[in-house]
Amino acid sequence: MFCCLETPDHIFYLIARSLSGEASPEELEELTELLRHDALLQQQYDLLVRIWKEKQNNNTVEDSFDANKSVSRIISRAASEEMEEDNIIRKKRNRKSRRIYFATGILIALVLVGWLWKGIGTFGPVSQKPGSEKIITQNGTRTRSLLHDGTTVWLNAGSKLSYDNDFSGSTREVSLEGEAFFDVVKQPNRPFIVHTSGFDIRVLGTEFNVKSYPDDKNVETTLYKGVVQVFRHEDSLSKAIQMAPNQKLVVSKQAANPSLKLSEERKSFAGEVNNSLFTITHIDSTKTDSARFETAWLYSRLEFRRDNFEELAKKLERWYNVNIIFKDDKVKKLNFNGSFEKETVDQAFNYLKQTILFNYKIEGHEIYVASSE
């Protein structure tokens, strides 16, 4: 559904040249441009720079020999592109330069080997040792990561994903706080389960969005491909709410209480549900990926529909990394529709003020909002 990096070998080559200090100005400019357009790649590059410097200060022949068998294929792929382009340069490389490329390749491969062996050209979180892994996005940022089973996850601002980093058990389980889009690799014998706000979302291989910030009243799941089952932690699969593609489930967090009964008895002929604890509605499948309301954030667009100012403020705080302070309760009840993409926070508030009158004052990261009266 979403594109990823298509030429990891060439990126490896540029990184190797950069770390070894032999990159040309043109190569450094190309690498800088790639890093500028991919925050996650920049993060991984910074980590590799640190590892490379530490490794140069404390490197052994045994380390390189042990890693050789595991990464030789990757190293040859990373170097093949430039070798074929200029055979003369390849012949002129001295032994020291070749050792630098080899060691650099090993460092890169050790970090990314789990994903490249699967032929997936993207970058994900780095694990230094077995155990629990966490991916955290601060307000004002979003990120994309590749999990160890090949599943891709996009995290919205102010979100946290934690999981067992090797997925070695009979299930692949993650815990989410915030909002994420998952493109899950299908493994029929090892279901993928998302834990959030008292609910479990079980899938085999699918694309879906989950929104469950701590201050949200509901858990929202939007399914685009595949099948998912949503159930409470204490319930069995027989009590799960099953979703079909192009459906959106909104379930109250209060429904996580095991004393409350979840059912689909009010299902209509169209397959929609209007329950006191949850609703299932259809989403417009004719819209393009970038035009969909629920996943607009993936395309750097903040959408809001009929949000009162208090609800919108939470989204704006995460989007712009600001703190919004209301001076009175009346202004909280104002309702807004719209979207922001490239607007600054000042431009965003100017737009809102043109729609509905209110007063605001920006002081650094603090925004004070009051009624116009």
Image (cartoon, rainbow, N blue to C red):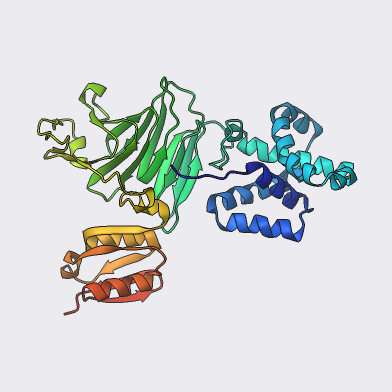
Which residue does the image show at 47% across and 39% down from the upper left? Answer: 152
Q: Position of residue 43 (x, y in %)?
A: 57, 51
Instruction: Work out whether residue 101 or residue 163 is closer to the camera in this orientation and state it.
Output: 101
Which quadrant is home to the N terminus?
Answer: top left
Question: Left or right of 265: which side holds 68?
Answer: right
Name the residue nearer the viewer: 132 or 224: 224
Residue 168 in picture, x, y percent from top left: 49, 24
Q: Quadrant of the C terminus?
A: bottom left
Give the residue drawn at x 52%, y 33%. Answer: 148
Could one spot residue 55 in this view of the protein? Answer: yes
Looking at the picture, tell me which residue is in the foreground, 258 or 68. 68
Q: Where is 147 relative to 22, above or below?
A: above
Q: Is residue 92 left or right of residue 358?
A: right
Residue 320: give x, y in percent of width and height: 39, 63
Residue at figure coordinates x 33%, y 42% from the top left: 210
Q: Quadrant of residue 241?
A: top left
